[in-house]
Image: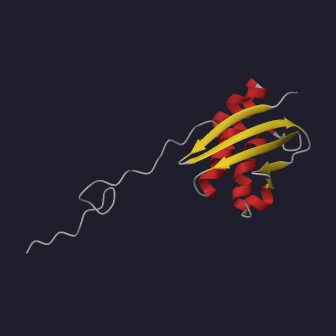
Amino acid sequence: MEVINAIGRRKSSVARVYLTEGTGKITINKKDLEVYFPSAILQYVVKQPLALLEVAEKYDIKANLDGGGFTGQSQALRLAIARALVKINEEDKKKLKDAGFMTRDSREVERKKPGRPKARRRFQFSKR
């Protein structure tokens, strides 16, 4: 099996994933998953598509993560892994889509508007 690559994005995070046959080792920016994401919740988020298809020990994953915070990065990585798994086996797409792993979360930060302190917040109004 050749190297399968996929991209996932969330907010300002970009995850580039390279999936190969192996033993289930996940490396992010040349660090182990447990080192890069010390939080068990974020590790769980990353492993969700693998656990759903029961292929956690079947593939090795190398990932490059850029931008954003930990949560956005973990969700971008989840999307990239799901997309890579679909490239391997097209029949898994329905399962992953039903679980919500194939959908790019399009929510972005709203820009700050002029004459306001934040995007929607207005300065305090005084009647008198």
Q: Where does the image place residue 15, in percent across and percent down from the top left?
A: 66, 44
Residue furthest right in the image = 23
Q: Quadrant of the N terminus?
A: top right
Report the quarter where the C terminus lies.
bottom left
Residue 28 location, x and y as percent?
76, 51
In this orientation, which residue lies closer to the viewer: 100 or 112? 112
Q: Quadrant of residue 39?
A: bottom right
Q: Give how far across and how far down residue 93 sits, in percent.
A: 69, 29
Vertical position of residue 49 compared to residue 32: above or below: above
Residue 16 occupies which quadrant of the picture?
A: top right
Residue at 63% x, 51% y: name it.
Answer: 73
In-image side of 93 versus 116 (left or right): right
How many numbered badges does the structure rendering display? 0
Most distant residue in the top direction: 90
Instruction: Pick whichever, 21 or 91, lies toward us.
Output: 21
User: Looking at the picture, does residue 107 appear above or below residue 5?
Assistant: below
Q: Residue at x 31, y 57 (%)?
A: 120
Judged from this view, the residue extending furthest toward the bottom is 128
Q: Residue at x 30, y 61 (%)?
A: 121
Q: Where, by quadrant of the figure, is residue 99 drawn?
A: top right
Q: Position of residue 122 (x, y in %)?
A: 25, 62
Q: How is the image coloured?
A: secondary structure
